[in-house]
Image (cartoon, helix red, strand yellow):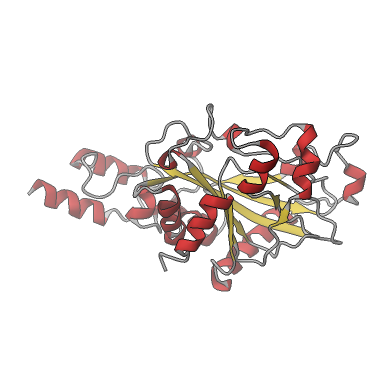
Amino acid sequence: MNRRHSPADVDTWKTQGFVLIQDFFNHEEIAPILKDFQQLYTEQSSQPGSATELDVKAAGQIGGFHPKQFLHFDTLPYQASEAINLISLHPALISFAQDLIGVEKVHLYQSHTWAKYTGEADYDQPFHCDFGNHTLTVPADNPSHRTVDFVVYISDVTDELGALRYVTKPDSNEIIGQREITAPQEVQIPLKQRERSAAAPSGTLLAHSIDTFHRGSNLTADNGFRFTMTMGYKAAGNDMIGFHVWQDAADRPWGKILNNASPEQLRCIGIPLPGDAFWTPRTLRLTQSRWPYWNMQAYVKKQAEEWQ
């Protein structure tokens, strides 16, 4: 259950920049999350018409960015089921992140939902890398200082339902050069000529690095929708990388995670393991007072053993 990837998947991610693993999550794991998406977003969707009526592309461009592309977007923890709140901390994702980054202690620094609907926006984007809003520097050369972005397909994602388009590292290096991390207008068409589709069924996991070129594409299927979740992992303690600040959402339903996640999962959002020096009689008492429904027995027991 904790390992759903192979050494070949790790190698593909490192050499190509992208790897798709179908059936990473099974139907029983995805079904309640699909129901959450339908309840959270479908009623909000206006689906006003064809996407061509909402075209945001300038003349000669293959895509652009517009706020309407991000209408249905939310951040962990979610006002929904335990399933949608815990999937970002799934042991198989943690294990995969550890192997990709090459460290034992990883931190979940990003988790968001994203629902798209045919006709609500023009989702065609230009080729870009994602590092710009993850770091104030650039992606590191040292693998342990890098990050991985996971995209989980909650619904089927076909070419007509806005499948992500990407360019492998070898192909983009040939077009742009190994040291380039931006794609100016003159290389957009050459990149498009090498693009590949990330179309895949529900339950698929897409892993990519934040310095690989990709773009969103339009939904053209009648009454179409595309439901995905994005999770970002980095090495614990890597202050160069950031996205969401979990402490900034203290009023959100953290109980859905605290009351159901293991200590190893909670460590990935910054909560020390049982036995850590942080845990003292005082911090245990106050933390339990703050979160009264969190079963902290493992932390209390370990602290008692340490103090004997």
Q: Give the left or right position of residue 123, taking residue 106 as reference.
A: right
Is 255 situated above or below 8? Answer: above
Is 74 situated above or below 81? Answer: above
Looking at the image, which residue is at 37% across and 36% down? 237
Residue 118 location, x and y as percent? 82, 54
Is residue 192 in view? Answer: yes
Residue 11 location, x and y as percent? 49, 56
Residue 239 location, x and y as percent? 42, 32
Looking at the image, which residue is at 25% across and 56% down? 297
User: Which residue of the protein is positioned furthest toward the front in this rendering?
Assistant: 174
Count of number-bearing discs: 0
Residue 274 location, x and y as percent? 25, 50
Q: Name the image quarter holding residue 129.
A: top right
The N terminus - image quarter = bottom left
Looking at the image, which residue is at 79% across and 33% down? 185
Please state which of residues 76 and 97 is positioned toward the viewer in this rendering.
97
